Amino acid sequence: MPLFSTAPPVPPQPPSVSQCRSAEGNVIPECATYTFLHQQKSVQARFSGKVVIDLKSDDVLSVAAGGTADVEESAGKSSRRLTVANGKTTWFVDGAERPFDANAKHWLREVLSTMPARPVPPSKPVSTR
């Protein structure tokens, strides 16, 4: 009688939080990158400067002058990306710019609610969950 063995399933990659680095490898102060899954889609979020996440507010995310926030979710050819920099918010769905409307804010709230909460001092965005 042949013996069959199967390898155990590979566990999903754990969420990660890391300090941002320049092209030269130097740590960028007040900057963190978060990599995690949201509804089986890959999410990369990068925050620099003073960024406040408030899941209960209408705005969801506020970025102080000089700061930036970039949140991208992707799965295959499908992608959504929000960038906030220099007082301007840009929202892209599958590479096409769209208005940052109520549906986009709902998406952002959902994605940020699953972001890992592990701090990377001093660069973790403030969260008022």
Image (cartoon, rainbow, N blue to C red):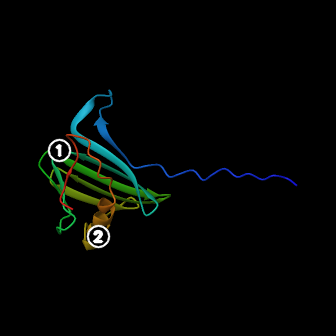
Question: Residue 120 sits in which quadrant?
Answer: top left
First reached walking from the N terminus: tag 2 or tag 1: 1
- Which disc number belongs to residue 49? 1
- Which disc number belongs to residue 28? none
In-front residue for pair 66/129: 129
Whether the residues at callouts 2 and 1 have beta carbons within 8 Å, the answer is no
Q: Position of residue 12 (x, y in %)?
A: 50, 52
Distance between mark 2 and mark 1 Cα atoms: 24 Å
User: Is 127 placed left or right of 81 in the picture?
Assistant: left
Residue under the point 17% across and 69% down: 58
Q: Amino acid at mark 2?
A: His
Q: Amino acid at mark 1?
A: Gly
Badge 2: how crowded within 10 Å, few (<14), some, or many (20+)? some
Tag 1 secondary structure? loop
Residue under the point 29% across and 32% down: 22
Q: Is residue 55 above or below residue 47?
A: below
User: Is 6 placed left or right of 45 in the picture?
Assistant: right
Q: Position of residue 39 (x, y in %)?
A: 43, 64
Residue under the point 33% across and 48% down: 34
Residue at image mark 2: 106
Question: Residue 103 sits in which quadrant?
Answer: bottom left
In-front residue for pair 69/117: 117
